[in-house]
Amino acid sequence: MTIETKEEPTRDSHFFFLPSLLGPGEPSEAWTYKSSDSWKTTICHSIFCPDGVPPGLMERVTAAVLSTVYAVSKGCQLVVKSAFHDKGIKTVDGPLKVKEILCWRTAFFLKLGTEVKSEKGELKESVVEIFTHLVDQDSHLCVGSDFMGFGTRRLIMSAKGQEGDGGRKIWRGGYLLVLKSVAKIMAEYGGLEYEKQGFCPECLTKKAVSAASAWDWSVMRDAVKHGEKTMRCCHGHRIDTRLVTGPPRDTPSQQNVETSNPTKLASGETAVPINHLLRGIVLVGLWDGKLRKVVRVGSGFIADKKRGLIVTASHTLMNIWGEKSTPFGEDYYGLREGKVVVGVIPRNKDSEEKSTEAVFRYFARIVAKDPSIEERGECHVDACILKITTRMENDIGGNGYGCGDQPEILLLNNQDALKREKLQQLKITEKCELDEQVRILGYNQGGEGLLGPGESLNRYFDFARGYVCKKFAGGNHFSGYLRHRFKPHEEIVVICPTIGGHSGGPCVNQQGEVIGILSRADPAEKQRCYLVPSCEWKHLLKQAKITF
């Protein structure tokens, strides 16, 4: 593989790699193909030599990769020919920083950081972990070992990082450099027969790595040639083709993503119209009594009309991300005069047309949230339960100014008064299938739910269609220092175009049942959204029902 150098690096230092100084041993604890983060994935490719691995392969591969990474980190820009797309592409999207290097005689580990610009123009660092290993068939790190002969070996290249945008930040964060360096070394072994394969990321996440499904290099090339957006492995997982074939061009992908399920509903089954769900969707605002205005906005839904209970996203009403500007986990972002204002779509008896505009009508308070926030200083569930406490004498429109000036009618512990409000609640289900059609409902604010100076508050309901593409379970055990961090136990990943303000809004199936609430969108791929499944917050709702 020919690598074209666009700019020579500054030669102010020397880099040496001495394989003889590396210690023996198996790096058994250095790597795992699993991830405890739903926004991360592991990409993996391998080279298998049926007639045996040539001598000195790992030393040459390690030297080639480290020297190339070193050159790029010093400013050398490399352009390579894509193995799948037949065109020249850049290997990195920004300045590359080497954060960590670990080497063994049969493996090396790299931790690389790349500076990339966000949509707002802010510089952020994308971190990618890369592990390359010449591994025996009987090793627990050997991917696809169930399909290998006894005593054989495989050269495995793998990388872990952000999954959004077809894994672009992984490929352009150092992984493409590694693959091209390895390909160049393999090409120098004239006459050597070997097989190249790519492995299913979903198999690496959900199954034993030894049973992971693989695609031959020619199959992946054909998928790109015929424009196939997704590929299915032998275990039935459907994955984005770009994850295993890499980014097709230098500019960030603008590829349109399907916003509806390719499969059809069962015969005779009708979807519940959106109009039948409208009045169960609420506008959730954080009211600052000192500033006399709504300072944060999200969405939610009524889960119990008799008790006036609402489910919404915690991050709209408290800091669960670990931001230093506000106290972690405190209700209402620590505002002394903070409380929740709730907007609903009013009944219109005089018109047959149903309105989609909400008015602020109620005040509410937080009555249940993830107990680990206070117990361990960490958050696993981006959901909380609100209880309607009072009704304003008059409905408030506009940006919510005047909510604090209205006389309030007490509804707390008054079921008769709540019954007269004729609230509409939505059904909840824990059932969720891959490829299932869904709709995310809420009030689009177009700015992460945070109102800036001069911005108006949108009170018109809208929705977006999509489909379930992944169900993630991270388990209950995480490594590292977790305090002031958000680590979800379970999430549902949906391909659906949403914008800020939908946070906390329900995601419903075709029967109108809530399968989860919206937590956030992927920063690299805005149409990739993460839901808090209903099974994660139903115990909070049950707790609130017992209390009230």
Image (cartoon, rainbow, N blue to C red):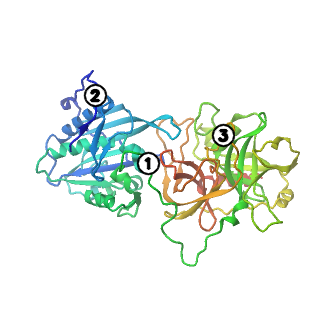
Tell me the residue that label 3 is attached to. 318
> Residue at position x 20%, y 40% from top?
58
SS class, disc 3: loop
SS class, disc 2: loop
First in residue order: circle 2 vs circle 1: 2
Left or right: residue 341 versus residue 257 is right
Q: CA distance from mark 1 to mark 3?
A: 27 Å
Judging depth in this view, the residue of 221 and 373 nearest the camera is 221
Mark 3 and mark 1 in contact (Cβ < 8 Å)? no
Tell me the residue that label 2 is attached to. 9
On the image, the x and y values in percent for residue 543 come to 70, 52
Q: CA distance from mark 2 to mark 1?
A: 31 Å
Judging depth in this view, the residue of 351 and 425 nearest the camera is 351
Tell me the residue that label 1 is attached to. 163
Instruction: Quarter of the image for the N terminus: give it.
Output: top left
Q: Quadrant of residue 110?
A: top left
